[in-house]
Image (tube, helix red, strand yellow):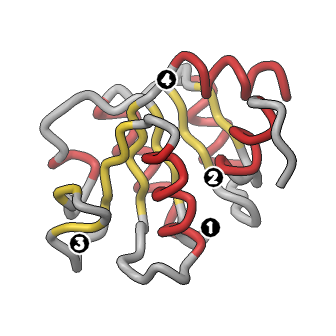
Amino acid sequence: MGDQICRVLHQYRTVAVVGLSPKPERDSHRVARFLKERGYRVIPVNPGQREILGETCYPSLSEIPEPVEIVDVFRRAEVIPPIAEEAMRIGAKVFWMQLGIRHEEAAEKLRRHPMTVIVDRCIKIEQMRCAGESR
């Protein structure tokens, strides 16, 4: 899985962060800021916000007007299935459930789509690991 994650993070550079918080102390905000600093195109998805981290915020994946490669989810496991469905509809390549988030049924459906699925991992930690950095 580690090599696959590094390939994903090297190959794909556009990340829609679902559940991105405008609050700087939140993990989603820190992770998205880190990705932006590393040169990733970060697209916030949060229906309650207009802009986060200087980027236009969209209420849903379907409303993003450009291709999305990675869907990085900071939402509770029980709301994963509709987000997964939407990720398939927009043609995302990777569905990433952040640390502590698992939904095996949705993950299996996504893999059959076929889509790369990463479960219960932090994209920031993994990016640092792939770059040979320590936390």
Q: Residues within 10 Å of mark 1 (few under 14, many from 20)?
A: some
Q: Amino acid at mark 1?
A: Ala
Q: Which is nearer the N-term, disc 1 or disc 4?
A: 4
Q: CA distance from mark 2 to mark 1?
A: 9 Å
Residue 5 lies, with reference to residue 47, above or below; the image says above
Numbered tag placed on residue 47 in the rendering: 3
Q: Is residue 48 left or right of residue 116?
A: left
Q: Residues within 10 Å of mark 2 (few under 14, many from 20)?
A: many
Q: Position of residue 118 (x, y in %)?
A: 69, 39
The residue at the point 21 percent across, 64 percent down is 59
Callout 1: SS: helix
Q: Nearer the viewer, mark 4 or mark 2?
A: 4
Q: Amino acid at mark 3?
A: Pro
| Pointer 2 with pointer 1, Cβ within 8 A | yes
Q: Which is nearer the N-term, disc 2 or disc 3?
A: 3
The residue at the point 54 percent across, 53 percent down is 34
Q: Quadrant of the N terminus?
A: top right
Q: CA distance from mark 3 to mark 1?
A: 18 Å
Q: Nearer the viewer, mark 3 or mark 1?
A: 3
Q: Amino acid at mark 4?
A: Tyr
Numbered tag placed on residue 77 in the rendering: 1
Q: Amino acid at mark 2?
A: Met
Q: Nearer the viewer, mark 3 or mark 4?
A: 4
Residue 66 lies, with reference to residue 46, above or below; the image says above
Residue bearing mark 4: 12
Residue bearing mark 2: 97
Q: Is residue 128 left or right of residue 26?
A: right
The residue at the point 51 percent across, 23 percent down is 113
